[in-house]
Image (spheres, rainbow, N blue to C red):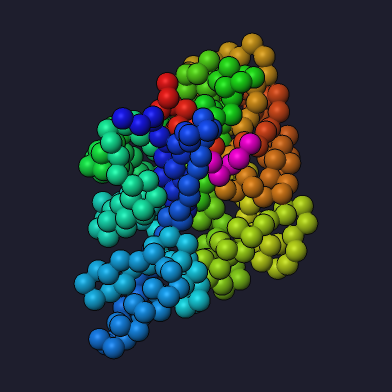
Amino acid sequence: MSNGKGLDIGTNMIVAAEIGSDGNAHFKMQRDAFYKIVPKSEVNKNSIRTALERRGANFIVDGVNFIVVGEDALTIAIERNDIAKRPLRKGILSPKEKESLPMLKLIIKNLIGEGDGGVMVFSVPAKPIDTYFDIVYHTEMMKGYLKEMGYNAMPINESFAIGLSELLDKEHLTGVCLSYGAGMTNASVLHEGDPLIEFSMARGGDFIDQSVGNALDESPSLIQLEKESGVDLTNPSNKIMEAVSVYYSSVINYTLENIVYELNRKKSDLPKFSVPVPIIVSGGLSLAKGFVSKVEESLSRLEFPVKISEVRRAKNPMTAVANGALLAAQL
């Protein structure tokens, strides 16, 4: 039986983590996206298959249709002035999206392969405070699928996983962790390794892509790729980046205001920290240059109910959740 593994099941990216033969954590990543191509004829079907195979695209044939998954799904969608779909919406599987689970299964299987009974700790979002999602359905479906693949699957809250990854050495697993992902923003307050408060908000990178796309009449998929090529919030380089910067500030302000409100509402559950604690920011959005400064600026206008020592970005925001899940699998 192998050592435990970690899996970050994100709206935009799925990241797997395992301990390599060198004793270090190793990560693999796949974009969580799919795009359907419908042939117009039998000849067209053969030509599409040939083109996809020569491109080296990852695809499956569903009846007469081709479904491209992963990075190629986003690229081909943009080339066709269209939008790639995602198996996850706002961080979870929806019972209404019947084609989502098979797509997510395919992407995960391509990434991690079959298991041999070892522990697989996988990330799940917390219950949102600003909308309603069926977190239970998502968690149980993922647990069941990973079990089918041969893993002993156990869920972990996304932002708690960040705490395990980033707060273990100096802070003894004590602090505030914020995961700014594509579909949601997750928050946890940890005290000595115990996540006393956990919740999420239904606003993240997709909100920025949709908002900028609507404002500039561009495809959200194009905005996403532009954003992922590098964002400088302090010095936007063009019209798209100016709009991206505006909506980054909107997401940061919205989430921090809601976090202050929720922590005040749950004051009886909030630990009395003996010293100021750090806020750890992670997730794809936190990669933007100037992100930490924007968070600090927004916090300066708020009465945060916990004394903060610093705002710190995770060492690697794209792998922090998977790394935390991996650490949990080793405990």
Outermost residue to the front? 21
Which residue sits at x=43%, y=69%? 56
Residue 278: image location, x then y, percent: 65, 26
Query: Residue 97 occupies which quadrant of the picture?
Result: bottom left
Which residue sits at x=67%, y=14%? 275
Viewer-side residue, 234 vs 225:
225
Up/down of 52 relative to 286, above or below = below
Viewer-side residue, 319 vs 204:
319
Query: Is residue 316 covered in magenta?
Result: yes
Query: Residue 147 occupies which quadrant of the picture?
Result: top left
Up/down of 175 relative to 8, above or below = above
Residue 18: image location, x then y, percent: 45, 36
Give left or right: position of 83 versus 222. Answer: left
Which residue sits at x=71%, y=28%? 310
> In which quadrant will I find the N terminus?
top left
Query: Residue 119 occupies which quadrant of the picture?
Result: top left
Residue 279: image location, x then y, percent: 63, 30
Viewer-side residue, 166 vs 22:
22
Q: Which residues are magenta?
A: 315-319
Give left or right: position of 64 versus 128. Answer: left
Q: Do we see residue 218 in this rendering?
A: yes
> In which quadrant will I find the C terminus?
top left
Give left or right: position of 16 versus 176. Answer: left
